[in-house]
DNA sequence: CTTTCAGTATGACATATGTCATGGTTTTGG
DNA sequence: CCAAAACCATGACATATGTCATACTGAAAG
């Protein structure tokens, strides 16, 4: 996380995304807002520890994964538009460990909450926002789960590739990806090959090129969508 | 939903479950609290419409299902201990439609919110509670999803049977159940048969008897747990 | 430069699950 | 009481997915 020293831009963004309207005591918190940037692949949130910040995700793309007790990690969803991050962690629930990673460079507004946490608990505008954010996520996650259960790997993989690719180029560690999608490496490879033979992807020594972006989207079945 | 006219019991339960401590303006809401009972199999929450109540689930057992756009319905989880119901609906999100059914007779405290909704939005104690409740659910649902993805139907079915059975007797509409578990009727039958052949269940003309409750629990893998 | 290791790739086989056809049984509406 | 509908049951076959063994490759470490 790199802090961007640009007061003007910070203020512009805060207005643009209506941050003042989301806090009753906005003025009090003002000194604790910072404009920050995350590099591609940088980890934004992980486990405990990182709880000193609440993040307002502004632009870029992030990937949310759920860390399992057996050490595995499963994809939950992607976000590409305004979101509150750290809402779960705000409640200091330890049983949940999600890891949020920047898929593309991201701009966020960070609110350092260590010293204002107590005050935020009295801020009903903020609490409404927090609660609404959680409600939205719950809705989304429930829906995604159902789709996960109902559709084959093909859909999840198509959606994943569609979302993380840049310039129609897809290149990721497939071993890790199989973990993320909750499947076996073997099977992942099979489906990748299937995509290739269907002319959706084309294999290169390093990574794949998307040849039929439209078809990929069709297969994705609205999964993991933002 | 049947209202139980028993002021004394209502007050006792409200104290026991610390309802006064969950609202800043508790006294204002007092006239809107009611003690209610749901019969076994009665629908507690469904779609829109039912939003005039917030429910504090006290005793019994309930089943939460997610209604899909294609008309299907998928099991989300069970609850057997204190829970807030209607938190999602409180935010008036239409995309989410969950149905909550009483698996066993239930006692709840209903709070009629039609006239106090606005006031509740200013009640930061309540908002904290609401938000915390949503955070817990989100955590749980994420976890269950992952398990769903990682374990075979066997686990989900075992957990389901374990939870809805009474006196070691299990008797439900298997066609509906297959829908609920996101699988095919055929496959459900197969696994049921498997349980029988393993001596976990015993088939009777009407329903099944659990012979090996312990094994069933083992198979359940902590799924759908409360 | 060689060894090691992580990542890639593939075949063979097993298991989990879905689909379809078909028939039996029970419930229910008339 | 009969017919229709809903539910239960099972076989055959297809597809989705997992497991294991094995081998190749390129990059990192010594």
Image: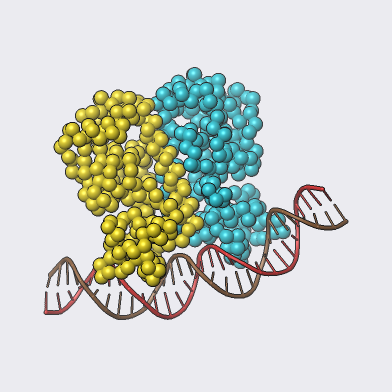
Chain colours: A yellow, B cyan, C red, D brown
| Relative image position of residue B15 (x, y in whole percent) | 51, 26
Q: Which residue is drawn at 25% across and 70% down?
A: A205
Q: Which residue is pictured at 48% across the width and 34% down the height?
A: B92
* Camera sees residue A103: yes
Residue B215 in the image: above or below residue B95: below
Of A143 and C27, nearer the camera is: A143
**B121 relative to B34 in the view: left or right:** left
Of residues A52 and D1, the one drawn nearer to the viewer in this rendering? D1
- Position of A106 with respect to B195 (left or right) is left
Q: Residue B189: which quarter of the image?
A: bottom right
What is the quadrant of residue A197 in the picture? bottom left
Please state if D2 lies on the left or on the right of B158 as rendered. Answer: right
Q: Tell me if residue B20 can be seen.
A: no
The quadrant in which residue B205 appears is: bottom right
- Estimate the x, y position of residue B95 in percent, counting from the top left: 48, 42
Residue for point 56% across, 42% down: B99
Q: How many numbered marks have been drawn onto this rendered protein structure?
A: 0
Taking B181 as reference, is A19 above or below it? above
The residue at the point 59 percent across, 28 percent down is B35
As drawn, the residue found furthest toward the top would be B28
Q: Position of residue B132 (x, y in %)?
A: 41, 36
> Residue A69: x and y, percent?
37, 53
| Quadrant in which the N terminus of chain B is drawn | top right
């Amino acid at each position: 996380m790199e802090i961007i020293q640009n007061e003007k831009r910070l203020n512009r963004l805060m207005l643009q995304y209506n941050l003042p309207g989301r806090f009753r005591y906005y003025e009090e918190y003002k000194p604790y807002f910072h404009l920050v940037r995350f590099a591609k692949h940088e980890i934004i949130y992980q486990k405990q520890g990182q709880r000193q910040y609440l993040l307002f995700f502004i632009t870029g793309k992030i990937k949310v994964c759920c860390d399992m007790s057996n050490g595995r990690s499963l994809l939950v969803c992607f976000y590409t538009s305004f979101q509150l991050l750290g809402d779960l962690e705000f409640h200091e629930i330890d049983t949940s460990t999600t890891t949020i990673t920047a898929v593309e460079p991201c701009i966020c507004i960070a609110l350092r909450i260590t010293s204002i946490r107590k005050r935020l608990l009295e801020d009903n505008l903020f609490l409404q926002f927090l609660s609404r954010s959680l409600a939205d996520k719950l809705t989304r996650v429930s829906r995604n789960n159902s789709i996960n259960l109902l559709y084959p790997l093909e859909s999840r993989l198509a959606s994943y590739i569609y979302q993380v690719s840049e310039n129609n180029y897809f290149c990721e560690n497939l071993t890790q990806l199989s973990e993320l999608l909750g499947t076996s490496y073997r099977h992942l490879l099979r489906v990748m090959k299937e995509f290739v033979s269907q002319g959706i992807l084309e294999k290169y020594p390093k990574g794949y090129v998307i040849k039929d972006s439209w078809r990929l989207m069709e297969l994705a079945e609205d999964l993991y969508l933002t």
